[in-house]
Image: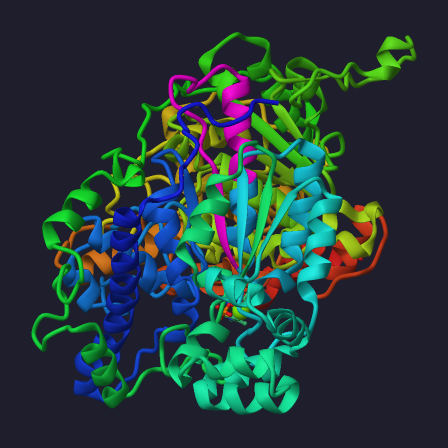
Amino acid sequence: MAAQPESRTAAARPGTGELAILRELEKKVLWLASWTIHNANHLRAAADGLKVGGHQASSASLATIMTALYFRTLEPQDRVAVKPHASPIFHAIQYLLGRQSRDKLERFRGYKGAQSYPSRTKDTDDVDFSTGSVGLGVAQTLFSSLAQDYVRAHGWGLERPAGRMVALVGDAELDEGNIFESILEGWKQGLRNCWWIIDYNRQSLDAVIREGLWARYEALFRAFGWDVVILKYGSLLEAAFAEPGGAALQSWIDNCPNPLYSALVFQGGAAWRKRLLDDIGDQGAVTGLIERRSDEELGRLMTNLAGHDLPALIEAFGAIDHDRPTCFICYTIKGFGLPFAGHKDNHAGLMTPTQMEVFRQALGVRPGHEWDKFEGLGVPAAEIETYLQQVPFAARQQRRLRPPPIEVPETLAVAIQPVMSTQTGFGAILNEIGRAPTALAERIVTTSPDVTVSTNLGPWVNRRGLFAHQAMADTFRKERIPSTFNWDFSPKGQHIELGIAEMNLFILLSALGLSHAITGERLLPIGTLYDPFIARGLDALNYACYQDARFILVATPSGITLAPEGGAHQSIGSPLIGLAQDGLAAFEPAFVDELAVVLAWALAHIQKDDGGGGPSERTWLRDEIGGSVYLRLSTRPIDQIKRPMSDELRQGIIDGAYWLRRPGPNCQIVVAYAGTVAPEAIEAVGLMAEDRRDVGLLAVTSADRLNAVWTAAHRARERGLVHGRCHIERLLAEVPANCGIVTVIDGHPATLAWLGAVAGHRVRPLGVEHFGQTGSIPDLYRHYGIDANAIVAAAQAIVPGRPIRHLTALP
Ligand SMILES: Cc1ncc(C[n+]2csc(CCOP(=O)(O)OP(=O)(O)O)c2C)c(N)n1
Ligand SMILES: [Mg+2]
């Protein structure tokens, strides 16, 4: 294994001059972060009596670590996920480096100001990975490291040095299970170049954490092949331990319970003295050690943990001379340097104006000069400025990369069988793509949490192989045992096989889907899973979308249509997730020709660049700026329609709906269906057509896009674009006002129920509201009321005039 990433030079200990500058920067960072929060709460928000919060204590515990990292250790190619509540520290550092504006800081947590938690998309100061939902940003660094390895193993981006993916982790954050899932996966995949720096302040949001957790962490990380560095005591304490009586002091502090330590930190020097003398005072060496120090000195000594000791941190970071994953357990104090340090209730604590005033005076910051970068520093401004200009991390101007898109043909080839499921169609399309040596085929990377074969990725994997650092041949093939699948691993493979953890799937997709911005090399990630298990990783999916990672999610099988697979696997709510999830365009095609159109569109859509601006506020649509795509597919083979793919049909499929049977002028019933219930909708329309003329059949390929464009049209009209009409409005304009619409989907009926609001038609939405029964598809469609009979009965109930004649013939 390579020793160090190429460009990295062994970091020497900082000299006294440099250390003096770094110490000033550390103070400045803490001041600016605290002032940012104070300003937002006491000055800006005071006008409307609103406190906006800001977690002064939680940020403070990382001030020293982040000073060491950003101003000394990190290189431009390194990427960092900053613990959510350290956001003010991050913004302060970027401000000092000239990458954050005072205006944004002044509006911290306010409209379009610096964000409460670092945000890739909403902040403007170059956030590498968003955080907020604890645990996810941490795992993101691990998977970003795998994504980087994947890119480099394919021979791309080698002109740039490999970066370290660094997470600044809250100790309570380690309670999140997704972190452990990722550690296990990282071990399997040969993780490297990943650092997790644990802010071991022994406090969570509510309380002080359990004793001895560090030992569990240490054992755990080591078990998975990580290097573990424990940074406990700072240089002052280390020196004191070496004094006469120091051993007793060390033993006392080693055994001090976390809550007591925290309480003493809060109480300060005099309390330390009393407690220490009571516990270990000996009228000899130990007492001498304590009494030689003033209250203030004793307080400083007893809180001198390594996580607040710049030289110790810089040395520890610089000493890592390998690329194995490394976990630093850094002892810190929550709120260090601030008056509520150590108090168990300090999580959301804010300093009072009086406390802030004391802090200001201590740092020599004059009123009116709070935002001045060099105010009150003990080193000449010019020296600090020169230092800041050569900080390695800030050397590369453009850290967010924008490679050009990979070309995607308008149509993807696929041999459509007369009877076929969308899932089989998906496998067949990918297989076709995999045949040709195109850039498109090369840049696709697939992944699946142990459902590769059962989601039909098998043919693609046979062609393109599995990814691993080291080649590993398929033993079954070597032994000449017949098998449908070729399970060969190599560094050139294009499928990343994951263990069964959907959280990992989504965070890997998030990492692969940011490869263009992080490594400068575009990947086209496609992840597959069973539709119901989206729920298992939903927060991670939301997280991936939130930070604008780009990927295609193929969820199959879905609904109750997976019938014999069992009730436990049925999904109801996922179409609503597709409808509601920001940044994710959801489709539920019924036919394979639709799927081919959608997939081609999706491969282009995930590559669109928003230029950093987000969607146009006029419409809020993502068509121009791109996003991720979710395809809800099915294992149900259905009769395919033989038809040419016209431009109009293609556009309808992409826009979300088209008439499979156009309603006539006397139309009284329209059936609007989505997805795999197409045969039932077609059958019902056929039955009703015997009695009623002009029955319409609307094929909905994307309730999500239809709905989004409809909302956007309203928005645009309300903003003055009076003539704008959207796709669904145009489609339903043909439908007479007294016509009823029956909607049907193998999913929650609310997905399509809103169609009635478009032009005021009466709607009876059919769908699935309960689940869990096994059976054949006809059994279940009848049971849950989405078969042809149910559609006809629903039509009967809302259609004007005499009963639909055929109804009497139905069982
Ligand atoms: C998934 C999730 N659950 C809950 C929260 C609310 N929350 C924010 S910070 C926090 C505690 C964090 O403790 P720790 O990670 O130790 O950081 P510290 O505050 O000590 O710096 C909690 C529960 C969240 N942000 N995300
Ligand atoms: Mg904590």
Q: Is residue 135 visible?
A: yes
Give me the residue at 59% from left, 48% from top. 327
Give me the residue at 39% from left, 31% from top. 516
* Image location of residue 302, percent across then percent down: 50, 75
* Image location of residue 181, percent across then percent down: 69, 49
Q: Is residue 278 above or below residue 662?
A: below
Give me the residue at 70% from left, 38% from top. 187
User: Hey, which quadrant is residue 590 in on the image?
Assistant: top right
User: Hey, which quadrant is residue 57 in on the image?
Assistant: bottom left
User: Is 410 on the left or on the right of 371, as rendered?
Assistant: right
Q: Is residue 469 above or below residue 516?
A: above
Q: Is residue 36 above or below residue 216?
A: below
- Report the quarter where the N terminus lies: top right
Is residue 393 on the magenta stretch?
no
* Image location of residue 548, percent across then percent down: 40, 45
Give me the residue at 84% from left, 46% from top. 564
Q: Nearer the viewer, residue 741 or 565?
A: 565
Which residue sits furthest left?
A: 368
**Magenta span:** 143-169
Q: Is residue 668 visible?
A: no
Q: Nearer the viewer, residue 559 or 311?
A: 311
* Image location of residue 673, percent across then percent down: 56, 49
User: Is 473 on the left or on the right of 152, as rendered?
Assistant: right
- Report the quarter where the C terminus lies: bottom right
Is residue 160 on the magenta stretch?
yes
